[in-house]
Amino acid sequence: MHHHSTTTDEIHAAQIRVRMACCCREQPHPADVEFLKAHGALTDELAEMISFVP
C-alpha cells in the first residue's frame, strides 16, 4: 500500500505558505491547511496563527 510519498519539502513549503498568509493577515489556502492536517503537520503555532486571521 504505497501512495505518492509526500516529501518533507512539500510539507515545509505548505507550512511556509500558511505562515506567510497569516503574516499578511490573509486566510491561508484551505488546501494547504487540509494538506498539513492530513499529514499531522499543522502545528499548534500555525493553528493559532490561522485562528487569529480575521
Image (cartoon, rainbow, N blue to C red):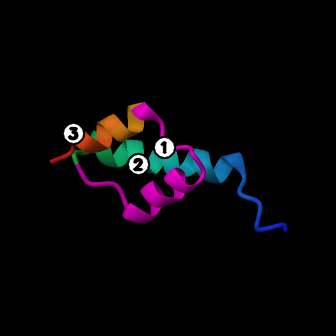
Disc number for residue 42? 1
Question: At numbered mark 2, what does the secondary structure look like: helix, strand or loop?
Answer: helix
**Left or right, 29 with reference to 10:** left
Q: Earlier in the sequence, mark 2 or mark 1?
A: 2
Question: At numbered mark 3, what does the secondary structure look like: helix, strand or loop?
Answer: helix
Q: CA distance from mark 3 to mark 2?
A: 13 Å
Q: Residues within 10 Å of mark 3 (few under 14, many from 20)?
A: few
> Where the N terminus falls, by quadrant?
bottom right
Question: At numbered mark 1, what does the secondary structure look like: helix, strand or loop?
Answer: loop
Q: Residue at x 33, y 49 (%)?
A: 21
Residue assigned mark 3: 52
Magenta stretch: residue 35 in it?
yes
Residue assigned mark 2: 18
In the rendered structure, are the residues bearing label 2 and label 1 in contact, judged by CB atoms less than 8 Å apart? yes
Residue type at tag 1: Leu
In the rendered structure, are the residues bearing label 3 and label 2 in contact, judged by CB atoms less than 8 Å apart? no
Question: What is the x, y in percent for residue 45?
Answer: 40, 31
Picture quadrant of residue 27: bottom left
Question: What is the x, y in percent for residue 28?
Answer: 34, 55
Q: Please state the extent of the stretch shown in magenta in the rendering.
A: 26-44
Residue type at tag 3: Phe
